[in-house]
Amino acid sequence: MKMKKEKRLDLGTIDWNCKEMKISLAALLILGSIATLVAQLLPPRSFFSASQLRTCLSEFFPESNSSFLSLPSEGKVQVEQQDGRFLRRAFNPYGAAAYVFIQMGAYRGGVDTFAVVGLASKPLHVFAKPRIECEWLPGNASAEPIRVNGTKMLPDWGYGRVYTVVVVNCTFPAAVGVDGLGGRLVLHAHHGEGEDVPPPVRIVSLTEPAGSLNVSKFTSPPEYDYLYCGSSLYGGLSPQRVREWLAYHVKLFGKKSHFVIHDAGGIHPEVLRVFEPWVEAGYVTLQDIRAQEKFDGYYHNQFLVVNDCLHRYRFAAKWIFYFDVDEYIFVPRKSNLDSVMKSLLNYTQFTIEQMPMSSKLCLLEDYRRVRRQWGFEKLVFKDVKRGIRRDRKYAIQARNAFATGVHMSENVIGPTTHKTEGRIMYYHYHDTIANRREPCRKFINVTELTFEGTPFALDDTMRALAPAIKRFELKTIGDRLVRTPQ
């Protein structure tokens, strides 16, 4: 009897589930009929457009990578058609030409101002002139966000290629983040104006953890007197030439100096061995920037690199120098670097005159000892052709600069001077830094000559400094680099 009762209960349960299923199936049938009717009344592809989908995604994923949100256009394909006397042609866009912004660094410039350094599509910023908005999201949840228009600077003088350098200055009407609760700096990068432009890309440029802001650094004396911001190093560099250049400038700039070196592929193992003792001694910081090569900018993105260095070390040094590793800063013996820089303290920046040197001519008397001599010790003939405008390099008081270039800055507060002749100059040994062979190609026994159509004259100024530089290197880092190859 008990078993029969359980069977009747099971059958009752099955009967009750079947009723529920009938109701559910009927409801689904009605909904399906309605959906079919609505679909027939709507035009094709009337669901979500690509731009609507991007907007929707940006609401749900505001922190997402901008490339994820930059979906390709999927608009309706246009076809050509006859319109009266005209054949109306069609233009159908596919994909994306370039990123709207590629950030390298974001830095505070004070309690109310920031700088964001990056690359952006050159045609977009040169012709469309899109806006970039800055937003500060306070760490204090009860505080209101602040949004302002950013000020864009394009400091590469039009040399950009697919990408141009963009430095964005974000200055807010009041101090932000000084309550110790942290916050985030967000950029909203617009593509321009028009009906079909994508929505702005949201970029979280800088996150400040609670308690991380030290406002005293904006007014405290800098750690270094002189800081070197190097352009991108690439190619097959000569370890020996790098060795000579570094030892010379560490001695010239002194103990309160630092060198920031950017590796774009030029620091191969032999060159790295030259830098290592100076890194260990605290004089050099190496930065690997090889990833920038996939973004086609000017000359291994050197304008990007120098601007990032400017803002990264803006409060770390009194003066930042910009020149190359085949160029040697020189101050006449009657003075020293400190006295020269003190005399130029009223200028935000100054440019430095070039002394172009031959990369092939050497003295006949050095023929048997040339392999033991350093480059600037044996290359002693200066190009003396007149009437030529030669490139100048420069130094800048970084706290007064908003952006910079390779040969000077056009975005500074304060005066610039070019009248530095006789006080400071640089000797330029062009075509030597990437030459792994012995540079001397012609040995001569005269003090003046014309070689390959260019007049040269003997200038042994740098040669006289070589013994002191060699002794300084041995005293500072020992004999680790004595057997450095060409």
Image (cartoon, grey):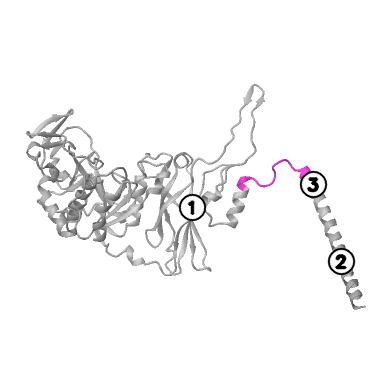
Q: Amino acid at mark 2?
A: Ile
**Apparent side of residue 22 relative to residue 281 in the rendered image (left or right):** right
- Tell me if I can see residue 132 in this picture: yes
Residue extending farthest right: 1
Do the residues under discs 3 and 2 have CB atoms within 8 angstroms? no
The quadrant holding residue 406 is: top left
Q: In the rendered structure, which segment of residues is drawn in magenta?
A: 36-51
Q: Is residue 129 left or right of residue 283?
A: right
Residue 421, by quadrant, is top left
On screen, residue 224 above or below 36: below
Q: Which residue is mark 1?
A: 133
User: Marks 3/2: CA distance?
Assistant: 33 Å
Q: Secondary structure at mark 2?
A: helix
Q: Left or right: 300 with respect to 45?
A: left
Q: Decide whether residue 66 is among the magenta residues.
A: no
Q: Quadrant of residue 317?
A: bottom left
Quarter placement of the N terminus: bottom right
Residue assigned mark 3: 36
Question: Which of pointers 3 and 2 lies earlier in the amino acid sequence?
Answer: 2
| Circle 2 crowding by C-alpha within 10 Å: few under 14, some 14–19, many from 20 | few
Q: Which mark is residue 453?
A: none
Whole-number angstrom distance, CA of label 2 to CA of label 1: 64 Å
Which is more N-terminal, label 1 or label 2? 2
Measured as percent of width and height from the top left, residue 399 is found at 31, 56
User: In this figure, which residue is indicated by the disc labeled 2?
Assistant: 14
- Find out whether residue 45 is within the magenta segment: yes
Residue drawn at point x = 49 percent, y = 40 percent: 128
